[in-house]
Image (cartoon, grey):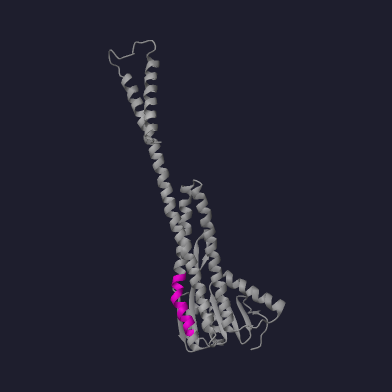
Amino acid sequence: MKSKSPMWYPSNMIFRHQYEGGVWVDLEQPTEEEIREVAREFSISEPFEAELLSPTPMPMAAVDSDRILLVLHFPESGAEGATKNQEIDFVVGNRFIVTVRYEIIASLHHLKKILEAQELTHGSVPVTTDVLLEILFAHLYSSVRDHTNHAATQLSRVERDMFDGHEHRTVRAISSVSRAFLNLEAALANQEEPLRRFLEALEKKEFFGDSFAERAQRIFSNRTHVARLVKTHGAVAGELRETNIALLSAKQNEIIKILTVVSFIFLPLALIAKIFAMKATDMPFAEAPNGFWIIIGIMFVVATLLTLFVLKKRWI
């Protein structure tokens, strides 16, 4: 197939890039009619077309004649740092790739801009379907890696705040980052089996020759590497949570200890004050001209002795 410049369908939501021997069609928030039109063009079966027409709750892979369907969900940063899953549907044949998505995905948008720039500056770049497929997955998993590194950067800031004495403030921040890593880990774990079946089906169909086995291994290794990175940072987040809990507990114990020591010193003084406040006859120092100062002196001596006792015991 002769290579030519990328073009847009009239809807501006369908990107078409023709390369040496094939074509990549990317549908972003397509209408039902647009999906049916592309399905007719590439002879996509009705079951596959039905999957493209509506979101699929879980990742999956399926084979139909000489077409292979893959549905994956990729984690992406949402509002207020939350993580949401974005679905991408792939239909791959011998000489074409069709991708369908229901919202803007930054990594694919970036890849399309790169392809356009290459066409403008260098002309047609020789590429085959299997190479483009690897490039697609490389961009998608690179985006997940960037999201993971961003969460890890937040975790580093949380760690600094925690050891600067802001344990209470970091409780919510650690929970938020830990939740992000859990969502990432779950999304990548759900991808593992469908992606494996998809790549194995492509090898069995022998669309791309013997060299695709190594390329498939690199695609799957990309997912595995990102999954390990997420798991490592998730473990760090768990350790920080435990450390934060320990620091909070230590600070609370210190506060309780100080309050206990203060009570230990001032309760006897309060008792002395209550005793001398009793309206009983023959109360010591009641008639003495300097009775008030004598009682204050007694209380001062008792407080001093109790303070020395506390210091000797190293309670504070």
Helix, strand or loop: magenta stretch: helix
Report the front residue among 75 and 122.
122
Report the front residue among 183 and 240.
240
In the image, residue 202 sits, relative to residue 183, either above or below, namely below
The residue sitting at 43% across, 76% down in the picture is 193
Residue 218 can be seen, yes or no: yes
Relative to 264, 130 lies left or right: right
Report the front residue among 120 and 139.
139
Residue 147, image x, y percentages? 54, 64
Relative to 18, 241 lies left or right: left
Relative to 263, 28 lies left or right: right
Tell me where residue 292 sits by quadrant: top left
Q: Bounds of the magenta span?
A: 188-201
Say which quadrant the N terminus sits in: bottom right
Residue 96, image x, y percentages? 57, 85
The residue sitting at 48% across, 62% down in the picture is 233
